[in-house]
Amino acid sequence: MLLLWMLIFMCIQEPIWWCIPDTYGDYPGSGLFNTACAAGQQHKEVYAAFSCAAMLLYCVLILDLSIVSMRISAFVLVCGRVVAEVGLFLMAAIFLILAFALGISALDRQSPSFEGIGNAAFSLFAMTLGLYPSENLGELKDAVGVLITVSVFTILIAIFLLNLLVAQLNQAYQLIFPDMQGYARLNRASVIVSTVDQVSQRRWSRFLESLNLDERLEFNEGDVGLAGGIQVMEPSW
């Protein structure tokens, strides 16, 4: 349902529709099915955001194909179960970023990258992701207090929290995985049931007729048994 709404919003924000009234206007790129008009440019950014969300939802739907393999399906379910551990790590990281950003903003001598709560929080967030430019570290030479505070933050994030996250994920994986094979089978059954529910009555009746469940099964030659089953031949050896 969420994907359907994303597609509806994409259709509403489609720049081509907004450029139809001004298809052959006086602007670069004018012509049939163009997106270069002023109205189309105004909606292009919103359309791109909905397109991104729709593509992500499409990829999420592809995860249903994991039921083909019990091992892959179990792995997907395990990933879903350990997301809570990642959420705890993110909460702790956000708390540390805000705490150290507030602390750095209270220092007398500050680096330009850490001036103010917003800049400090953004710089610490970049350090957490490993995206902080190394050339900006030279600014911390003149701000010893900021350098010490940032060093403590880096130790807490890179050494303590990340290793704690790895340990939590490892422990959660070991506790959850033995039961995931059973959950994977239940998930496969759930997908099959939901798929069968969407099959039309005519197609389902035709499928049942092809099974010939009304015919009595032959156990041995001349030994006719009960109906309602599917006969499977076994090798004689």
Image (spheres, grey):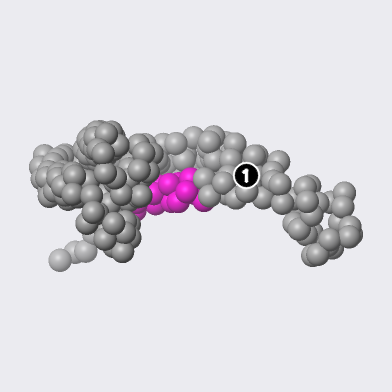
Can residue 106 be seen in this snapshot? yes
Q: Nearer the viewer, residue 211 or 89?
A: 89
Residue 134 picture quarter: bottom left
Q: Which residue is mark 1?
A: 46
* Residue 138 screen position, x and y as percent: 26, 61
Q: Is residue 63 magenta?
A: yes
Q: Nearer the viewer, residue 211 or 153?
A: 153
**In terms of secondary structure, what is the magenta stretch mainly?**
helix
- Magenta extent: 55-69
Of helix, strand and loop, which one carries label 1? Answer: helix
Residue 136 picture quarter: bottom left
Q: Which residue does the image show at 87% across and 49% down from the upper left?
A: 21
Q: Nearer the viewer, residue 109 or 185?
A: 109
Can residue 232 be seen in this snapshot? no
Q: Which residue does the image show at 87% across and 52% down from the upper left?
A: 22
Q: What type is the residue that disc 1 sits on?
A: Val
The quarter of the picture where the N terminus appears is: top right
Left or right: residue 172 compared with residue 82:
left
**136 w.r.t. 179: above or below:** below
